[in-house]
Image: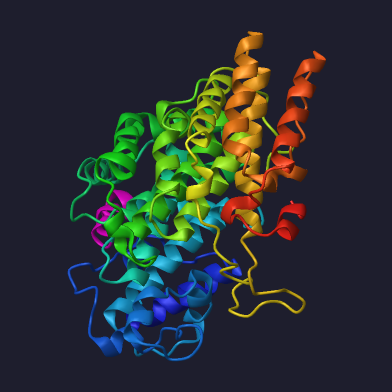
Amino acid sequence: MMKISLLQQMYKDVLAGIPLAKESHHYSSLLTLSVEQPAGGDESCHQRHLPPPTGGTGSDQDADMVVPAADDLSNSFANMSSSFCPREVMLLQLTLIKMMVAKAESQQIESSTRLKYCEIFVLLLKEAKTDSKLVSLLAPHDQLLSHMASQSLAALVYFQLKEENALNVTWLSFTLNTLLGFPGNTPVADCLWTLTAIIKEILKNAVLPKAGVLKKLLAPLDAVLEGFYNAILFHHFDSHHYTSPYSEATTNLISFIDLLEALLASRTELELPLRCQRVLFLKVSYILNLISSSIPYVIKKKFILLLKKCVLHKCREDAGSGSVSLQALPLCEDVLALSNAVLQVVTLTWLNQIPLDEKSSYFGSSEPAPGDDPQGASDQTVLRALSLVVLKALEFKIHNSAAEAEIKGGLETAAFGLENFSCLEHVLILEIAEPDWEHQALLQLEKKRVHSTSICSGWGTERNCRRL
C-alpha cells in the first residue's frame, strides 16, 4: 500500500509541475514495472476502477472493443482509493511515464525538473530494463494495458532519439521480428502503432533536426517495411479475414494505414526519401485492388482519403506552405506512377465496383443532425475524395506528357472510364495549358458524359453530384 500512496503523490506532483524532491533512484524504483505478475488479473480487478464503456453497461464483447481514452483514465488516478490491484498499479505507472516524457518537452516546466525527469528515464532504460518489460505487455488479451504500454514505449524510444541520438535496440529488435514474422502470432497492431506514434512525435518537434532523426529511425526498417507492405496488402491478403470491422486483421490493416500516412508526412523532411516512404506511390495497385474488394467500408474509406492526400501532395497537415513542389524528384516520379496506376484501373470499370455507403456516423452519434436527410444520402466525403483522385491523376498525366499523342491517349483513356461517371460533371475543371485542342478534347469528354443515359451508376443521385 505504501508504493501505491507514493505513486499517487508522484502523479499529483508531476501533473502540477512540482519539482520531485527525492533522488532519481527513488522515483525510478516506483516506476519499475512488475511484469512477472499476471497482467490480466481477475475480472473484478479489470472492472473495479475503469470507466464504463460509452452508452451504458454493454456486453462483454463491447467491453473488449471499447478502450477508454488515456486522458480520461489518467485524470481519475489522483482521486482513486488505495485498493489497487497489480494491473491498476501498472496502468498508473505507464500513465506517469508517458506524462513525464510530455512534461520534459514543455518549456513551461523548470529546466531542473526536466533534467530530473531525464535522469529517471535513463535509469528506467539502463537499469530497470523498462523497454523490454513494455514490449512484453504488447498483447491482445488486455487491450487497455497493451495500448498504454505502446504509448509509454513510443515515448521512451522518442526520448532516446531526441536526447541521446540513439535508437532503442530492444524496440528495434521487437519491431523487426514482428514485421518479418507476419503473419504470425505476434501482435502487429501495437507494433505499427508504436512506430506511427514515434514518427508523429518527431514531426511535431519544431527544433529537432528531423531529417537526421527520421533517417536513424527508418533506415534500419526500410526494407522490412516494404516487405510488410507486400505481405499485408498482397501476398498474405485474404478478404475472408476482414468480414468484421472489429477483427484482428482489420485492426492490423487500419494501424498500417495510419503508419502509411505518417510515412507520407515524413518524406518531405528527407531530401532523398527512403523506399518505405515511396512504396505507397510505386505499388499503389495493391491498394486500388483492395478498395474494390469485399473488405469493410471503413478500410476502403481510409485508403481513399490517403490517396487523396497523395495526389493533392498534402504530405504535412501542419505545413504552412500548403502543397509540396512537384519539381523535386523523386516526388514527381512517384506521383506520376500513382497517376498512371489510377488511370489504368479507371478503364477497367474500377469506379463502378466501389460502393458508397450511406453516412455511417454523425460526429460520434448514431442520429443525423437536424435538417439532414438520412435516406439515400451517400458518403459525400468519399465521393469527393475519389473524384479528386481521378481528376488530379488525369491532370498530372497531361502536364507530364511530352508527346501530343500521349496526351490524347490519356484523355481517351479517361473518357472510356468516366463516360458513365456523371458525378464528375461539375468538378472536371483542370488547369491545363495551351494548345486549345486540349480544352476542346475536355469539352467533348464533358459533352459525352452529360448526354450519357447512365446517371452516376450507383454513385448517388444527381442532387448529390451537383454538391461536389
Residue 83 in picture, x, y percent from top left: 34, 90
How are the colours assigned in the image? rainbow
Magenta region's main secondary structure?
helix
The correct choice, above or below, for 91 with respect to 447 in the image is below
Instruction: Indicate yes or no whether the magenta region holds residue 133.
Output: yes
Q: Which residue sits at x=37%, y=67%?
A: 246
Q: Which residue sits at x=61%, y=25%?
A: 412
**Viewer-nearest residue: 239 or 40:** 239
Magenta region: 124-137
**Viewer-nearest residue: 189 or 5:** 189
Residue 369 in picture, x, y percent from top left: 71, 77
Q: Which residue sits at x=74%, y=51%?
A: 468
Instruction: Indicate yes or no whether the magenta region holds residue 154.
Output: no
Residue 141 in picture, x, y percent from top left: 25, 70
The correct choice, above or below, for 274 with respect to 225 in the image is above
Kindly indicate the quadrant of the structure image that contains residue 446.
top right
Residue 228 in picture, x, y percent from top left: 30, 39
Q: Is residue 341 visible?
A: yes
Image position of 171 (left or right of 344): left
Q: Which residue sits at x=37%, y=54%?
A: 153
The correct choice, above or below, for 388 with respect to 139 in the image is above
Q: Is residue 130 visible?
A: no
